Amino acid sequence: MASAGGNVVLSMVLVTLMALTPSPTNSCPSSEWAALMAFKAALKEPYSGFFHSWRGTNCCYHWHDITCDPTTRRVAGITLRGGEFTVTGHISPSICNLTHLSSITISDWKGISGNIPPCITTLRSLQLVDLSGNLIHGQIPSDIGRLTQLTVLNLAANHISGRIPTSLVNLSNLMQLDLRNNAIQGPIPWDLGRLKRLNRALLSHNRLTGPIPRSVSDIYGLAELDLSLNRLSGSIPRSLGRMAVLDSLNLKYNNLTGRIPWRLLGSRMTHLDVSRNWLSGRIADAFGENSYFISLDLSRNNLMGRVPKSLVWATYIGYLDFSHNRLCGRLPRGLPINHLHPSAFDHNPCLCGKPLKPCSRL
């Protein structure tokens, strides 16, 4: 039987241990600590500088670029941005054991490769995923659409291949989609217009084929659409010109055919680039007081006919390029020639008038 003095000593030891051991309400669960240790083990940082602060068992206490929910003390965010340190390796599937994650940023390391862990789609609280600027390859998880809380998906500047998953259109809260500079192929989902909250869709510099989905024009708040440097074909949907918020449209370097919709030229957007396609027909006389183009590029197509007279009524044109087409005739008098360089009309052999050669008979 323990003596009274022994009980006092035991009590003092227990009190000391309790003081030294972080309270469960003030430290992250051991399972999440283990998950972060496995995540760290999959990444190699030769100088041990970046993970220098990852010490002890409480990953919610002064661990660099780890954030925790102050109420639940569960890991809520990982933010590892490239900088002065060199990190290689891959993203460990152990990250999926951090079941309360709402934000993952692992970007601009240039040395992180491997696949996107398929289990990432089980993290239903995710609102932001930024894996841009790495060497990640493989495909976008086919069931990415399970992440219905996601508002930002940025996978730009990697080596991702395969198709855009059809489930992507289930991301009903998605506001920014950035898949630029990858090797993604196949068509853009025909029902992309289901992403009603999308305001930026950047899909340039891939290997996308097929038409531009007409449903895109159903996304009321879409302000920027970049589909350049792909292999898209077919015509430009006329409905794009009716989008009230669309401010920047980049379709250059594709295989688009047909006419440039007149509504597109008469819209309120400030950046329009449809250069280096196979567009034909006349440039619509659709410009007016609502036209305010910081940049307007229609170059390197098969456009013909005259430069539209209504261009002189545009409120502002900063950069303009109509070169390398089949335009002909006199340039409209009143063009803002102080802003326009003659190269804007190069390789249209029978164009004339200021700032080009004088017209002899036109």
Image: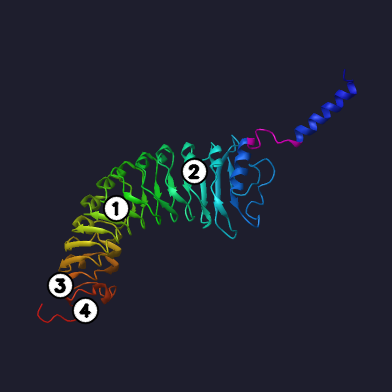
Q: Could you give the CA–CA distance between mark 3 and mark 1, rounded to whole angstroms?
A: 33 Å
Say which element carries label 1: strand
Residue neighbourhood size for the residue with mark 3, other residues' Cα within 10 Å, grouped as few (<14), some (14–19), many (≥20): some
| Disc on the earlier residue, 3 or 1 | 1
Left or right, residue 118 beside residue 68: left
**Foreground label between 3 and 2:** 2
Residue 197 percent location from the top left of the image: 36, 43
Residue 25 among magenta residues: yes
Q: Are marks 1 and 2 in contact (CB under 8 Å)?
A: no
Q: Position of residue 182 (x, y in %)?
A: 40, 55
Label 2 sits on what residue type? Pro
Whether pointer 3 and pointer 1 mark residues with C-beta atoms closer than 8 Å, the reply is: no
What is the span of residues highlighted in magenta in the rendered image? 20-30
Estimate how packed mark 4 is, as few (under 14), some (14 to 19) or many (20 or more) residues with alpha carbons within 10 Å. some
Give the structural element (helix, strand or loop) at label 3.
strand
Residue type (three-letter) at the residue carrying disc 4: Leu
The residue pinned by badge 2 equals: 117
Q: Earlier in the sequence, mark 1 or mark 2?
A: 2
Q: Mark 3 points at which residue?
A: 328
Q: How far separated are the C-alphas under marks 3 and 2?
A: 56 Å
Q: Which of marks 2 and 4 is in front?
A: 2
Please, which residue is most extreme toward the left here? 361
Where does the image place residue 209, in percent across and percent down from the top left? 29, 52
